[in-house]
């Protein structure tokens, strides 16, 4: 910084700028509150359907989120500017104080060009004059150097913050200039360590790199600067070499147990970086995709896809990057498998290749495994990927055919079709030298994200949009595929928890399917749509397929629990919704309460009955510890519910019940569904502790009895909450409807899935 610029600086403009940003911040906070409580709140309460329920509602939710990001970014800018102003004022004060002290020693400071000169007064007779002049000069230079650092780092930090997004706001938060500057400096330091010759990296530097990535992985400026400095090629080379015991024996020997932590911290950092819209990160994403099909090193070794897929198992990567990366990955697989005709041997480890995945679940050489894990955290990208073509009907392949005019012709195959039904997965081993389940398990997680619209392993919230057409289409394909060959799931039972969660979030669609309503009968169809309302796009499924998938999911305790808990909540919500006398006439299924309650109870009874058929097939004989696992899984669902029991758990946002007064339903429950779920969890906890198990037939009857109880109680509680006089009759109608639906499940299962049934 020029001497005169600091010495004579007038900070009024900077003061005004800080004041303006403070005013802007206040306004943005008000707008954010209005958007959150007004715009967003009203949108989520509105009874929208079709396009508005998905696109418009989601857009409003994202717009409200942008206001939140805007006020966060405005605060960061204001705080950086304010901190910079205060620090520059401090340097100006120090500069003037030093000059004043110099005058006391008969020294004069004069501006000279962009710098300055220190002169000793002619009449000074001090014997230390030259030394004092030199000391003053050095002090002033230090002050100017610090002022320059403050000014340049502030400029760099502000530019980095604003450049994170081309459109909208980043939401990055920095309390002052120093914190933003520290993120940039730390990124440069750690990128330099990761870019070192692997043979020269010390154990201490490994620890510094690992700790730094852990601390800063969520920092947007740090992540962008780290990734763009290291570049795509450097990222691939670093992970390839750090996992190779022959590249640096000291680090590998002493820190190989920490490689899993480094893998996670690096993945989280790259995920954060991928969201940045800077030109450097745009190039990084393109380069990483292009490098995927090439060996990392010129002398061979793993391909880029094999390395990078292990660095995307954690975090939320940018959707467009995942889509482009996935397309390139599938193109490479097609090339090396002759459009899927042969196994993906290209992904098998060769000789002494080191494990690229350090978690112990698999070796990491099949890039599909890590990529699918990335998709499980990025729902929109997952939906696009699975619905995309693997091979078209015009390509040369040996897969699906369809009859056209009496001839068998080739049909297209989606990425879902290929991965779920056709792919010859290369053998993988875990760290215990057992066959790895990670590939198909991650496939199930990715499908969970793709069909539900939220990351796998999470429950839907009020912010989760209703299902769109693409998600519903994928759900239809998934249900039909499992119905077509139930061993696609039963041979890989560990996938059932995700499939069960998916089914639990499509219960309105599943309940519609059980009615066997003729889609051509417009009047009957309209009535069923009112009985089981859906806000977004419907997954239109066949009754037979629905029953077969419920039978299959019911054979796994976790899958069973997800649907059973969801169905009980959904049934209770429906009772509450339909028995509300304030429900508008155009939304009513019928004015006949007996018919209404019976229909809801019948559909719910059939779903629970079908699940219990699957459960008894899994136990197949006298109940033992395996049967307890079912009750334990149901009981554990209580631990996964936050913010109280019920209120749409397992149902998604395609249907949200109206709240009712807690006193009306008894106890501490705030909704009818919360009361029913509390009963369900308590009963499951008790049964899980029982020492004696029931026989197969007794288990079926016990399931029927408990289902009747929950359904009757839900109907009566809803009737009381809405002050209906005939609550006793309503409870009885619910009981008989539930009984008929439950019993029909067993009969229907015998018809549509005889191969899955065992004689009781």
Image (cartoon, rainbow, N blue to C red):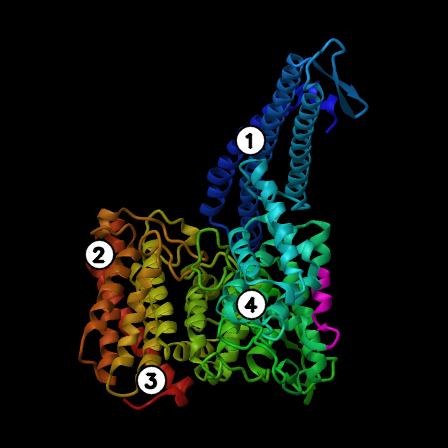
Image quarter where the C terminus lies is bottom left
Q: Earlier in the sequence, mark 4 or mark 3?
A: 4
The label nearer to you, 1 versus 2, is 1
Q: Does dot 4 land on a helix, a strand or a loop? A: helix
Foreground mark, 1 or 3, reads 1
Question: Is 607 colored magenta in this rendering?
Answer: no
Pointer 4 and pointer 2: residues touching (CB < 8 Å)? no
Q: Is residue 94 visible?
A: yes
Which segment did they paint magenta?
286-299
Upstream in sequence: badge 2 or badge 3: 3
Inter-mark Cα distance, 4 to 2: 72 Å
Residue indicated by mark 2: 727
Closer mark to the observer between disc 4 and disc 1: 4
Counting residues from the N terminus, which is met first, the one under dot 4 or under dot 1?
Answer: 1
For discs 2 and 3, the disc positioned in front in the rendered view: 3
Q: Secondary structure at mark 3?
A: helix
Q: Quadrant of the N terminus?
A: top right
In this rendering, would 739 be left or right of 448? left
* Front-most of residues 436 and 169: 436
Specify whether residue 292 is painted magenta: yes
Residue that badge 3 annotates = 617
Q: CA distance from mark 1 to mark 3?
A: 61 Å
Q: Which residue is mark 4?
A: 251
Q: State how far apart marks 4 and 1 are (Cα).
A: 48 Å
Q: Residue furthest right?
A: 113
Q: Residue furthest top?
A: 123
Q: Position of residue 283 (x, y in %)?
A: 73, 57
In this picture, residue 302 sits left or right of residue 688:
right
Label 2: state its secondary structure: helix
């Amino acid at each position: 910084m020029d001497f005169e610029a600091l010495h004579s600086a007038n900070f009024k403009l900077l003061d005004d700028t800080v004041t303006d940003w403070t005013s802007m911040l206040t306004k943005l906070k008000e707008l954010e509150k209005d958007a959150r409580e007004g715009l967003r709140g009203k949108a989520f309460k509105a009874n929208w359907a079709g396009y508005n329920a998905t696109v418009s509602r989601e857009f409003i939710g994202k717009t409200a989120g942008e206001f939140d990001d805007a006020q966060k970014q405005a605060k960061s800018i204001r705080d950086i500017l304010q901190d910079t102003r205060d620090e520059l004022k401090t340097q100006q004060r120090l500069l003037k104080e030093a000059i004043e002290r110099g005058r006391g020693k008969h020294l004069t400071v004069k501006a000279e060009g962009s710098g300055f000169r220190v002169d000793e007064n002619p009449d000074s007779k001090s014997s230390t004059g030259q030394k004092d002049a030199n000391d003053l000069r050095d002090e002033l230079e230090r002050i100017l150097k610090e002022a320059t650092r403050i000014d340049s780092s502030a400029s760099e930090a502000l530019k980095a913050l604003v450049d994170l997004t081309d459109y909208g706001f980043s939401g990055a938060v920095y309390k002052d200039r120093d914190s933003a500057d520290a993120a940039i400096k730390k990124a440069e330091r750690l990128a330099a360590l990761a870019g070192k010759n692997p043979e020269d990296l010390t154990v201490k530097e490994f620890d510094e790199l690992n700790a730094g990535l852990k601390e800063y992985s969520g920092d947007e400026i740090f992540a962008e600067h780290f990734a763009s400095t290291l570049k795509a090629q450097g990222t691939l080379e670093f992970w390839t070499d750090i996992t190779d015991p022959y590249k640096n024996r000291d680090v590998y020997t002493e820190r190989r147990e920490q490689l899993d932590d480094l893998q996670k911290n690096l993945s989280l950092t790259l995920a954060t970086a991928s969201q940045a819209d800077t030109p450097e990160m745009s190039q990084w994403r393109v380069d990483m995709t292009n490098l995927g099909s090439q060996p990392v090193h010129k002398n061979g070794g793993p391909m880029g896809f094999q390395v990078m897929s292990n660095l995307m198992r954690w975090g939320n990567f940018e959707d467009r990057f995942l889509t482009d990366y996935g397309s390139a990955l599938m193109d490479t697989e097609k090339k090396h498998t002759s459009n899927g005709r042969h196994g993906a041997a290209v992904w098998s480890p060769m000789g002494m290749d080191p494990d690229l995945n350090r978690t112990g679940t698999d070796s990491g050489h099949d890039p599909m495994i890590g990529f699918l894990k990335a998709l499980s955290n990025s729902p929109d990208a997952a939906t696009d990927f699975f619905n995309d073509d693997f091979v078209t009907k015009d390509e040369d392949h040996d897969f699906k055919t369809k009859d056209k005019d009496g001839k068998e012709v080739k049909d297209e195959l989606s990425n879902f079709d290929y991965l779920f039904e056709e792919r010859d997965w290369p053998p993988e081993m875990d760290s215990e030298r057992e066959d790895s389940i990670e590939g198909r398990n991650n496939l199930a997680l990715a499908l969970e994200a793709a069909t539900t619209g939220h990351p796998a392993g999470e429950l839907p919230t009020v912010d989760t949009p209703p299902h769109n057409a693409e998600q519903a289409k994928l759900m239809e394909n998934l249900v039909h595929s499992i119905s077509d060959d139930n061993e696609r799931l039963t041979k890989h039972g560990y996938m059932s928890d995700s499939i069960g969660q998916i089914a639990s979030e499509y219960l309105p669609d599943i309940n519609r399917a059980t009615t066997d309503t003729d889609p051509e009968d417009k009047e009957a169809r309209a009535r069923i749509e009112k009985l089981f309302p859906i806000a977004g796009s419907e997954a239109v499924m066949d009754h037979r397929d629905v029953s077969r998938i419920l039978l299959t999911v019911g054979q796994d305790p976790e899958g069973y629990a997800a649907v059973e808990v969801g169905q009980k909540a959904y049934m209770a919500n429906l009772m509450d919704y339909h028995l509300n006398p304030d429900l508008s006439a155009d939304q009513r299924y019928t004015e006949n309460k007996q018919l209404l309650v019976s229909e809801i109870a019948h559909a719910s009874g059939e779903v629970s009955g079908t699940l219990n058929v699957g459960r008894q097939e899994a136990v197949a004989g006298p109940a033992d510890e395996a049967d307890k696992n079912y009750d334990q899984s149901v009981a554990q669902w209580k631990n996964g519910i936050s913010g109280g029991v019920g209120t749409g758990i397992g149902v998604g946002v395609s249907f949200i019940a109206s709240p009712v007064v807690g006193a009306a339903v008894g106890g501490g429950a705030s909704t009818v569904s919360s009361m029913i779920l509390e009963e369900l969890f308590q009963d499951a906890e008790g049964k899980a502790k029982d020492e004696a198990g029931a026989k197969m037939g007794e288990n079926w009857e016990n399931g029927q009895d408990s289902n009747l109880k929950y359904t009757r109680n839900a109907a009566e509680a809803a009737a009381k909450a809405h002050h209906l006089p005939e609550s006793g009759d309503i409870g009885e109608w619910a009981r008989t409807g539930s009984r008929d639906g439950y019993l029909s499940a067993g009969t229907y299962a015998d018809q549509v899935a005889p191969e899955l049934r065992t004689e009781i």
